[in-house]
């Protein structure tokens, strides 16, 4: 089966993920990559991402995702996202704290492209939210989201919880009322569990996730290609390689076909029911 046919059949996910960088201005308690201001940048690079993006479209992939680290602390990120969005629909995962007035002006062209910025917001109470994500995170997010919405940029809110099924209904409704007040509708609110990898594993948080729980989505990093965006995690400063597909990312066909071989070898009825994608 070709890569394009496997995407059309659902054997492979249609989105290619790019880890643009690993450094971040925050130090979240459950971060998959142990990101923080002082960690190695491990940038994939603007030209590398754009080149692989063009290859991905030619192979039959249907969307892009950009994550980190915090993508928007890279100066070239608005230009990079514009380039990707001109090729295929693109989502960028962000902590939402880097949108000062200059940055807001720079991202305005994204309003004319099929681009969404997915911003993390975990709790309607500022103190509860900031306990996991860091001081002033809540304030910066609730200030940034309406400004992005006002500029016509698509915004999604992602809530990451220890146990989404155990959340008090009143608390969940308060969070929903908050994101609605910021201009984000219910269909653009994503709730997912913490994954027990990276810093979350160190802090004994989250649910286990491996090949059987994760959908195959080609994920490119400076260290190679991985099975899922939940794969290239870091613990104790060391990269996890249990979900590494290939050290090669170019030409893109090679890691894409390697991922397809793994996906086709999974036993029937594999469980992806934890809903983290």
Image (spheres, grey):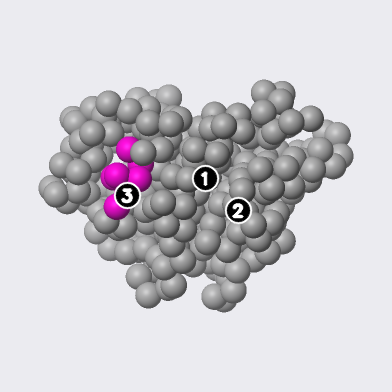
Measure the C-alpha gap from mark 2 to mark 1: 8 Å
> Secondary structure under badge 1?
helix
Instruction: Choose between 8 and 92: the one closer to the eye.
Output: 8
Q: Label 2: which residue? A: 249
> Secondary structure under badge 3?
helix
Measure the C-alpha gap from mark 2 to mark 3: 20 Å
* Quadrant location, the C terminus: top right
Mark closer to the observer (2, 3): 2
The mark found on residue 231 in the picture is none
* Quadrant location, the N terminus: top right
- Residue 150 quadrant: top left
* Magenta span includes 77: yes
Q: Is residue 14 visible?
A: no
Q: Label 3: which residue? A: 77
The residue located at (46%, 58%) in the rendering is: 44
- Expressed as whole percent of the image width and height from the top left, the position of residue 78 reads 29, 45
Q: Label 1: which residue? A: 52
Task: State which region is magenta.
Answer: 76-82
The residue located at (78%, 45%) in the rendering is: 262
């Amino acid at each position: 089966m070709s890569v394009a046919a496997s995407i059309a059949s659902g054997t492979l996910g249609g989105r290619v993920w790019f880890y643009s960088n690993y450094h971040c201005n925050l130090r979240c308690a459950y971060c998959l990559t142990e990101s923080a201001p002082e960690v190695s940048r491990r940038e994939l690079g603007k030209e590398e991402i754009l080149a692989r993006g063009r290859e991905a479209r030619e192979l039959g992939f249907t969307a892009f995702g950009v994550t980190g680290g915090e993508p928007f602390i890279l100066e070239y990120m608005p230009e990079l996202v514009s380039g990707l969005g001109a090729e295929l629909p693109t989502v960028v995962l962000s902590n939402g704290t880097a949108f000062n007035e200059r940055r807001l002006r720079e991202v305005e062209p994204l309003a004319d492209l099929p681009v969404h910025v997915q911003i993390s917001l975990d709790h309607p109470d500022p103190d509860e939210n900031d306990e996991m994500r860091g001081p002033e995170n809540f304030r910066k997010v609730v200030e940034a989201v309406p400004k992005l919405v006002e500029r016509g940029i698509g915004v999604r809110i992602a809530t990451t919880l220890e146990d989404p099924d155990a959340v008090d209904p009143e608390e969940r409704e308060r969070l929903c009322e908050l994101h609605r007040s910021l201009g984000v509708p219910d269909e653009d609110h994503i709730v997912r569990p913490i994954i027990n990898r990276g810093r979350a594993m160190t802090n004994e948080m989250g649910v286990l996730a491996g090949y059987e729980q994760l959908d195959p989505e080609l994920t490119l990093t400076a260290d190679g290609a991985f099975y899922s965006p939940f794969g290239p995690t870091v613990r104790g400063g060391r990269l996890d390689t249990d979900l590494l597909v290939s050290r090669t990312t170019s030409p893109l066909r090679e890691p894409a076909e390697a991922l397809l071989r793994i996906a086709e070898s999974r036993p029937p009825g594999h469980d992806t029911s934890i809903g983290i994608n």
